[in-house]
Image (spheres, rainbow, N blue to C red):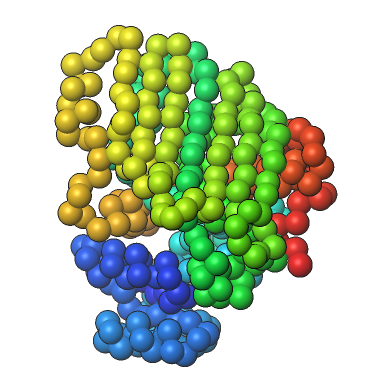
Amino acid sequence: MEPIRFGLIGCGRISKKHVDVLTELQDTNLVSVCDTKIERAEAVGKALNIPWYTDYHEMIKKEKLDVLNVLTESGTHAEVVKDIAAYGKHIVVEKPMALTLDDADAMIRICDLNKIKLFVVKQNRYNLPVQKLKEAMDQGRFGKLVLGTIRVRWCRPQSYYDLDAWRGTWAQDGGVFTNQASHHIDLLEWLMGDVDTVFSKTATQLVDIETEDTGVAVLRFTNGALGVIEATTATRPKDLEGSISILGEKGSVEIGGFAVNEIKIWNFANELEGDKEVAERYFQNPPNVYGYGHMAYMKDVVECIRSDKHALVDGLEGRKSLELINAIYESSELGKEVSLRFRPKKCRLGHS
């Protein structure tokens, strides 16, 4: 079989991970790249010795492509996806898939109408420690769930936000909940189940941006368990952690490290033979594999296209965490608890 042919739309900061994976992964071929900023497109294209463009319509028409990876600014994801869906190419879109629920729904609908797959990048689901945690959850080893907690304690100074005018804006980016913590919020909901209500507080502490650099949220899941989200980019002087902990009546697990990639605690009342192997073999991602989560994620994209199987994170699945993030902002604006399955009224995300 011929390799799956990829084209990148957007050559900014995140594109390096996609380039690294697609140039290493078997059964894929990075054909071309595009960016509206000519210097970015030219730099990546020339480094890889592949065609580069500043107009994605031109790239799609000229190149033979199977998949388009949308890596543009967060606030443009929906616009680009809706613009390219009619070409009939499968689409991989970086997080967040969109900023508003209306845009997310439109993306899902137009991809369905054009009979193409929509993949939303949530690579941390593929981390080895996270996979083992999900396995334990599916086996019912926790019993009754009690509490799920995520902590994102990262450092993003003013210079980070000054790199691009869209960073830290309501219309194009969002704050720490939408950007840095979105993967962790996805994991919490994926593991703990649907959220019933949320109450949140946000603040902008150490940088000059429109949105929040610090926030906390308290969740109640539909299964009765509680949840806590703590997220900040105001950690100084450097990053501390990106972690998740799950507590149940029969066990407790904490995965820490910079990006939920190291098992810190693996304790169950009923110990199984494989628990020792988890602690020794699966306690962290392979240290010598760059971008492990993205590599495993893209392998799954290829497999889904080859076998026409259901994606682990399709548009509907990607929408779930976006709805929770919108609810977090809605609660912060209203100063009260918000029920999920709602239509935002005060949430400023995705609006100028």
Q: Is residue 67 left or right of residue 93?
A: left
Residue 240 visible within the image: yes
Task: Pick whichever, 16 or 136, lies toward us.
Answer: 16
- Could you tell me which quadrant the N terminus lies in? bottom left
Percent position of residue 172, x then y: 64, 67
Q: Quadrant of residue 196?
A: top right
- Could you tell me which quadrant the C terminus lies in? bottom right
Q: Is residue 348 left or right of residue 267?
A: right
Percent position of residue 247, x then y: 45, 20
Tell me which residue sits at (36%, 47%) in the image: 258
In the image, residue 44 sits, relative to residue 82, either above or below, namely below
Percent position of residue 47, x then y: 28, 84
In the image, residue 144 sits, relative to residue 9, either above or below, namely above
Which residue is outermost to the front?
Answer: 237
Q: Quadrant of residue 349?
A: bottom right
In the image, residue 250 sits, relative to residue 308, either above or below, namely above
Q: Is residue 273 left or right of residue 11?
A: left
Residue 304 visible within the image: no
Tell me which residue sits at (55%, 67%) in the image: 158
Percent position of residue 149, x then y: 50, 31
Task: Pick whichever, 201 or 281, lies toward us.
Answer: 201
Tell me which residue sits at (28%, 52%) in the image: 292
Q: Quadrant of residue 216?
A: top right
Tell me which residue sits at (21%, 62%) in the image: 26
Q: How many marks?
A: 0
